[in-house]
Amino acid sequence: MADHGIGDYFISDVDDELIDEDDELIAAPVVVPQPVASGPVPAVVPPVAPATAPTPAAAPAPPAAPVAAAPAEIRPQTSVKAPTREERLAVALDDLMINSPDVQAAALVSMDGFTMASALPEGMQEDRVGAMSAAILGLGERAATELGRGHLTQVFIEGAEGYVVLIAAGPRAVLTALAQPAAKLGLVLYDMKATAGLIADVLG
């Protein structure tokens, strides 16, 4: 390899060979990238979500099964105690006193003079009323028979302080009532006959 001096610089043959080999590289055109033409940036369209199938309407709930009512509690039937005969007779006398205010006292007396039921004011003795009723009844029955008047149905006594009225209540009892002097005897007798009919049904 020969060195050729040119001033302070030397060019060797080796360099020449390298230059010759690189001539193609040096001579190769240089490609410069061209700037991209400016323009509106295309809008980015978001991806469209696929259409979902409509949600089917919820099926109507089946009707609730009827709830069977709990069976009513069965209570043992208690037998209602029927009123006794004495209670029915006492009720009949009380109704007579209520429906006929002119009646001050009432009693139901047997043919023997025994009191079966009574509604007497305080101070009046039940036994005395029964005994007097039996005496009056016996005398009236005897008088009716002797005089041919048939079976006795009613005895009426008027006093200064009021009235004593006796009416037959069936074949074995008599209803006695004491009425005040100003009593309306028609109403008193009407109420006493109605009560005597009820008593006859009770006694049988």
Image (cartoon, grey):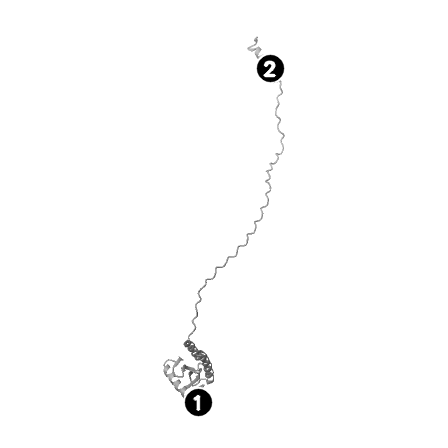
Return the residue nearer the eye: 55 or 135: 135
Query: Residue at the spot x=60%, y=15% of the render?
Result: 21
Mark nearer the viewer, 2 or 1: 1
Q: Secondary structure at mark 2?
A: helix
Query: Cα distance, mark 2 to mark 1?
Result: 187 Å
Please report whichever mark, 2 or 1, sits nearer to the chain's N-terminal start.
2
The quadrant holding residue 159 is: bottom left
Residue type (three-letter) at the residue carrying disc 2: Glu
- In the rendered view, would you say 117 is above or below 2? below
Crowding near the residue tagged with mark 1, few <14, some 14–19, many ≥20 C-alpha atoms within 10 Å? few
Q: Looking at the image, which residue is at 59% across and 12% down?
A: 17
- For the N terminus, the image quarter is top right
Q: Amino acid at mark 1?
A: Thr
Is residue 21 visible to the viewer in this orientation of the structure?
Answer: yes
Q: Which mark is residue 145?
A: 1
What is the number of the mark on residue 21? 2
Residue 23, by quadrant, is top right
| Residue 119 in view of the camera | no
